[in-house]
Amino acid sequence: MDRVLSGNRPTGKLHIGHLFGVLYNWRKLQDNYSCYYMVADWHALTTQWQDTSKIRDNIVDMVIDWLVVGIDPTRSVLFVQSEVKEHAELHMVFSMLVTLSRLLRNPTFKEYVAELRIKKETPRKSVLKTAVRNTVDVFIENVAKKLNSGEGKLDLDFMAYLRSELQKTFLENLKKTLEEEEEDLPYGSLVNYGFLGYPVLQAADILVYRAKYVPIGADQLPHLELTREIARRFNSLYGEVFPIPEPLIAEFPKVPGLDGRKMSKSYGNAIEISESPESIRQKVKRMYTDPLKVRKGDPGHPEECPVFMLHKLFNREEVDEIKESCIRGQLGCVECKRNLAEKMVKYLEPFREKRKEFEKDRSQVIDILKEGARKAALVTRETMEMVRDAMKIWK
């Protein structure tokens, strides 16, 4: 069977965005491919090198979520990147084939640098923060005056939503401007070599297994292109060793977080796969809803509502009914959230129960990863033999 390589950084327990955006797809791929699923702990060091104290526990917590969802170690190879040393060896070889200018053009790197420029404490940042705050305050005051000139007062949740949206839009445009403006490597003392070179390590991760396919979303195609460039360059210089990996494009459902943005741990808006029932109820209760539905009887706009988006994932049998009731103004947001929370509690219950079994003996997860590393190394050692032969270097 053709090989597939994919992986995650060890961030600990995964959230429902990972469930629908990654894990279900991984589970399905097991039926048709030889799958290698990697815990990318070396990649985690690119941004978490100062504090590595949680990485080991995060690895086990994350892999438990893989297992409870149905990633099967008897059908797929699950392993930790740093236990398979050939990843680092091939990374070193590939680093000779990539120019610095090519890495500096990496969109992810440019975005990261732009964020650093915004976060760095300088007088300029202070001016920008003041400008943002003043812009938001004036905007909210003007909107409040306009809406309050009619009946009732501007809903506090709606005001919070407007404030959040305006600030987010301002900062997104600021970041975009900085990305386009900067040609050099700013704040070099804050960016480590590993982060700049991570796409080369990523290429080694894929090509050391001579993987034919890489599952990604359409928006991630640029990330795979450097891997394809490196494979073509190596093959043209030394001989055909690596297949040119192809993307397995999947359309992943959008999973909104509690604040309406994309669900992410870094935003603090996530619901974990293993979240307790009470915590799910509390988090859903405070979710953003349709910003244009101020009062219970107002007609709603479900396609603009994060709560409705989650109904599509967890409560498909009632989606049409909820949509119609919301549009007609017959369904209140409190009732809608309460219904969603109970559906989510029930849907995630099997995963919570399976996790309890692994939590009783976390060593079994470590054993699975050790065995996976042994299997992975059988392939990677063969690949490096082929690389050394092709390059005619010392064995």
Image: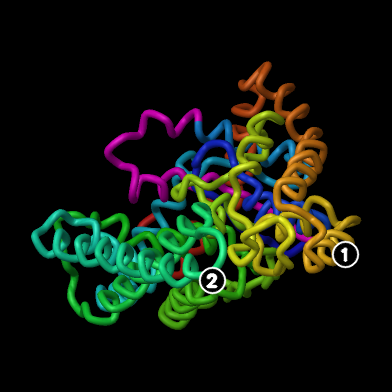
The amino acid at mark 1 is Asp
Tell me if 322 is positioned left or right of 378 in this view.
right
Image position of 176 with respect to 56: above or below? below
| Mark in the foreground, 1 or 2 | 1
Residue 248 quadrant: bottom right
> Which residue appears at 56% of the width and 45% of the height?
270
Tell me if 77 is positioned left or right of 349 in this view.
left
Q: Residues within 10 Å of mark 2 (few under 14, many from 20)?
A: few
Which circle's residue, 1 or 2, is located before the other in the chain? 2
The reply to whether the magenta stretch includes residue 258 is no
Marks 1/2: CA–CA distance: 32 Å
Give the quadrant of the C terminus: bottom left
Position in image of residue 313 (x %, y %): 77, 55
Observer-nearest of 46 and 87: 46
The amino acid at mark 2 is Gln
First to last magenta residue range: 32-57
Say whether marks 1 and 2 touch (CB < 8 Å).
Answer: no
Q: Residues within 10 Å of mark 1 (few under 14, many from 20)?
A: few
Residue 144 quadrant: bottom left
Q: Is residue 71 visible?
A: no
What residue is pinned by disc 1?
Answer: 320
What residue is pinned by disc 2?
Answer: 220
Position in image of residue 233 (x %, y %): 43, 79
Q: Is residue 281 visible?
A: yes
> Which residue appears at 24% of the width and 62% of the height?
118
Secondary structure of the residue carrying numbered label 2: helix
Position in image of residue 101 (x %, y %): 26, 78
Give the quadrant of the N terminus: bottom right
Image position of 216 with respect to 28: above or below? below
> Which residue appears at 28% of the width and 81% of the height?
180
Observer-nearest of 88 and 265: 265
The reply to whether the magenta stretch includes residue 55 is yes
